[in-house]
Amino acid sequence: MKKCRWKLKSLIRRLRAMGSSLLMILLSNAIYGQDGVAGINEANQKVRSYFDAGTELMYAVGAILGLIGAVKVYQKWNAGDPDTGKVAAAWFGSCVFLVVVATVIKSFFGV
């Protein structure tokens, strides 16, 4: 019985110590913590500054894909493949998709 009381008292002391430690950590975090608005605004400005370069890169990739697609379609057309129309539509669709995505994202974010 005495051993159980001793263990209970020891457990209560440990819980008090842990509770006071947790309270000190929370208080120090509240004192030294920052809201993060400045970091979010800085990240917003950096992303917006790179956005024009990213859009131009998407246009360039679309142009390169268009040239590669034109060569592939020309080769299939000269070879007489029956699925030339499907291949042409796929390449043309991918180029249009890149251009439209770049334009929509640019207008959506107001950059």
Image (cartoon, rainbow, N blue to C red):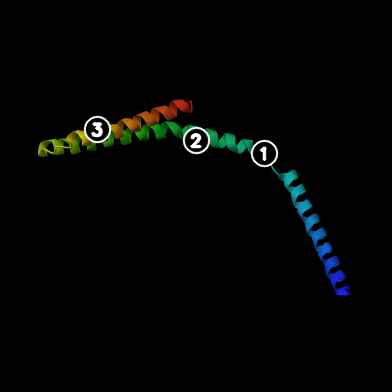
Drawn side of residue 76 relative to residue 27, left or right: left
Drawn side of residue 102 relative to residue 45, left or right: left
Q: Residues within 10 Å of mark 2 (few under 14, many from 20)?
A: few
Of the numbered discs 2 and 3, the one sitting upstream in the chain is 2
Q: Residue furthest front?
A: 1
- Label annotation for residue 47: 2
Of the numbered discs 2 and 1, the one sitting upstream in the chain is 1
| Figure disc tally | 3
Helix, strand or loop at label 1? It is loop
- Residue at 57% x, 36% y is 42
Residue where numbered disc 3 is placed: 89
Drawn side of residue 46 relative to residue 35, left or right: left
- Residue at 80% x, 63% y is 14
Is there CB contact under 8 Å for labels 2 and 3?
A: no
Q: Quadrant of the N terminus?
A: bottom right
- Residue at 34% x, 32% y is 97
- Label annotation for residue 24: none
Name the front one of labels 2 and 3.
3
Structural distance between the alpha carbons of marks 2 and 1: 20 Å
The amino acid on which the numbered mark 2 sits, given as a three-letter code, is Val
Q: Residues within 10 Å of mark 1 (few under 14, many from 20)?
A: few
The amino acid on which the numbered mark 3 sits, given as a three-letter code, is Ala
Structural distance between the alpha carbons of marks 2 and 3: 34 Å
Where residue 64 appears, as percent x and y from the top left, is 27, 36
Helix, strand or loop at label 3? It is helix
- Residue at 60% x, 38% y is 39
Is there CB contact under 8 Å for labels 1 and 3?
A: no
Where residue 33 appears, as percent x and y from the top left, is 70, 44
Residue where numbered disc 1 is placed: 35
Which one is nearer the viewer's eye here, 106 or 85? 85
Structural distance between the alpha carbons of marks 1 and 3: 51 Å
Is there CB contact under 8 Å for labels 2 and 1?
A: no
